Image (cartoon, rainbow, N blue to C red):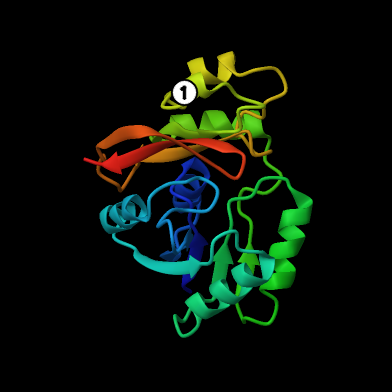
Amino acid sequence: MSAGLLYSGGKDSAFCLQVCSDVTHLITTYDRERGRLPIQGIRLSIIRLQAQRLGLELIEVPLPPNADNKAWIRGIRRGIKGKGLTSLVFGDLFLEDIRQFRERALAGTECEVRFPLWGKDTATMARRIQDSGIECRLCSVNALAVPTTYLSAHYDQRLLESLPVGVDPCGENGEFHTIVTAAPGMAPIELTPEGTIEALGYTILDYAPT
């Protein structure tokens, strides 16, 4: 069995690696003009460094700027072709419309689509992620939900207790995203913030590998 994990460089992806022992490949989509992940804004160079330290093959899926769902589907299907994968793993927790889209989009690829974290209580998940040894920081926020002062904050209990009312503790509604700096099986990565950028409604702290 060989699984490919749709990988964002954040906490949910890293936690999936701990609960799925058959992951052999990481699959990352990125904006081919900006060299960044479309939503999180993380530089592709950081994802490459994470994959290297995890000892996993990285499948890079370039997408055009402001790619639509059709472009995503074409890119993923092209990226996994010939890799011998038997399943694709996603770290989604509860957004039913996104799950249904992924299942429809990848039907016929001969890969089982798996959601190992699906339906988990997000407050419980937040604690499990923190207890697992994963270290991460907030790298982007939707400023309508989370103040930009939270950028670079460690994803820890103190942060969870201070989040504005109504913000999901895992950011599952898109309130914030994280970047992993250390995890079991991944040596720590030193990152340096180089200012902020605005993209797709998010304020992104532009980290660079040191």
| Quadrant position of residue 199 | top right
In x, y percent, where is residue 117?
Answer: 62, 48
From what the image shows, is residue 71 above or below residue 182? below
Please rate how many residues cluster around mark 1, counting C-alpha atoms within 10 Å: few if below 14, some from 14 to 19, many from 20: some
| Quadrant position of residue 171 | top right
143 sits left or right of 185 in the view: right
- In which quadrant will I find the C terminus? top left
- Residue named by callout 1: 156
> Which type of secondary structure does the marked residue at label 1 adopt?
loop
Q: Residue at x 66, y 26 (%)?
A: 145
In x, y percent, where is residue 90?
Answer: 59, 57
Identify which amino acid the numbered label 1 is placed on.
Answer: Asp
- Which residue extends farthest bottom? 82
Which one is nearer the viewer's eye here, 103 or 114? 103
In x, y percent, where is residue 85?
Answer: 49, 76
80 sits left or right of 113 in the view: left
From what the image shows, is residue 35 above or below residue 79? above
101 sits left or right of 206 in the view: right
